[in-house]
Image (cartoon, rainbow, N blue to C red):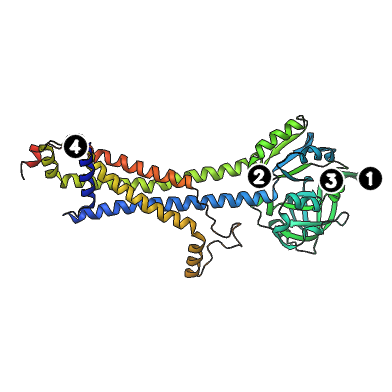
Amino acid sequence: MAKTNLSIMIGSRYSRARRRNGFISFISAISILGVAIGVWVLISVISIMNGFGNELRGRILDVAPHISITGQGNRLNDWQALTKTVDSNPEVLGRAPYIYAQGLLTLNGAVTGSLVKGVLPEEEIKVSEIADHMDVGSFQLLQKGKYNVVLGRGLAAKVGASVGDKVTFISPQGQSTPAGLMPRLRRFTVVGVFGGLGPDEFDSALAYIHMADAAKLYKTNDSVTGLRVKLKDPFVAREVTAQLADELNYRFYVDNWTTQHKSFFRALEVERRMVFITLFLIVAIAAFNIVSTLIMVVTDKRADIAILRTLGLSPAKVMGIFFVQGVTSGVVGTVIGAIAGVLTALNLANIIAFIEGLIGYELLPASVYIVTDFPAELRWDDVWVIVITSITISMLATLYPAWRASKTEPAEALRYE
């Protein structure tokens, strides 16, 4: 035990000592700084990506159903009969029927494809946050028989529509006339425009109309496409989906947001992992600096090592001295970087506001980006993984120089001293 403490004592003293070779001290400082910068940047960027992911997920869940229930052929003939079963689940906050269809939207010669969603406004606001994302107009103006429409911001821009304009919807289902099969057309008045709902598919393609008007346009009679369900906690959607499917005797197709937007969230997770791996290369590069520093220190301390060996210190204990010195550099850099990263993540909004004020430029203008700020979510699990991995890399980086020090031959090292 005494010899082990001796290795730690000497290694710590070497770490604190002022070296005769100023270049070695400079390289040592650079290695500590490199580890600190790597850990700082990694924690900060991962926290920003966590924040962006949660922001986009929240915006999607504002308009996308937590759970949707539909029947064969995307038709639900008696949705009222399902409400008792759905409402009995303690995790359910609300439900609303909807008709979902495709069509063409035209105005003044401009034509574009659109996704049409027929809803009951008074029910839809219980399960969706669409009313809170209105740029202009009101979602409540969707009234039965009035043939009003609320367009996504991107969709309105494609055809040049604004509130008060008359747009024409063309249904893909034709109608028989003496002249043959003709497309079914209906003019709607634009009463609102919404935006900022996450992926481009919402803003650039989605249009809301009253469910009764959608039933007439698409000839669905009394059937609807499905029933939308909102949960208290959207992250238990898979469990509630299984419960509802079982209670409904698997007579209906029960889906949830985790599968409907699987590709999008998987892409976010893959991107997060790749950024994590890429940024960790900064820490790895700093670890190479630790290797080079220790190799130069070993060369500089050859005489000291030889004297310690002649006094009876074993090669393993010599290796321990330089192992402690290298790990000390890694730990110091990691701790400094972790503190800086945590402080940056917790105060990111103020930091970005200061930078924007300094340069006089908005980094995420609302006209270009869906998310106009830099949200950051600090997860302590991520911090611990980064800290432990950084220290582990620093420990591995010390093994070769420490092993090389343990192989020093006293007679050879002291020959020219």
Which amino acid, mark 2? Asp
In primary-sequence order, the first of circles 4 and 1 is 1
- Residue 305 in percent (x, y) is at 14, 41
Distance from Cα at disc 4 to Cα at disc 3? 83 Å
Query: Who is closer to the viewer here, 180 or 250?
Result: 250
| Label 3: element kind | helix
Q: Residue at x 80, y 58 (%)?
A: 140
Which amino acid, mark 4? Ser
The quarter of the rendered structure image containing the C terminus is top left
- Residue 99 in percent (x, y) is at 80, 45
User: Residue under circle 1?
Assistant: 178
**Going by the picture, which residue comes out furthest to the left?**
416
User: Residue under circle 2?
Assistant: 233
Distance from Cα at disc 2 to Cα at disc 4? 58 Å
| Label 2: element kind | loop
User: Residue under circle 4?
Assistant: 406
Disc number lying in front (3 or 2): 2
Query: Who is closer to the viewer here, 391 or 198?
Result: 391
Residues under numbered marks 2 and 4 in contact, where contact means CB atoms less than 8 Å apart:
no
Residues under numbered marks 2 and 1 in contact, where contact means CB atoms less than 8 Å apart:
no
Distance from Cα at disc 4 to Cα at disc 1? 99 Å
Relative placement, left or right, of 86 versus 47 is right
The quarter of the rendered structure image containing the N terminus is top left
Q: Residue at x 13, y 40 (%)?
A: 308
Which amino acid, mark 3? Tyr
Query: In this rendering, does residue 176 appear at all?
Result: yes
**Going by the picture, which residue comes out furthest to the front?**
2
| Mark 2 burial class by Cα count in 10 Å: few <14, some 14-19, many 20+ | few
Distance from Cα at disc 2 to Cα at disc 1? 54 Å
Residues under numbered marks 3 and 2 in contact, where contact means CB atoms less than 8 Å apart:
no
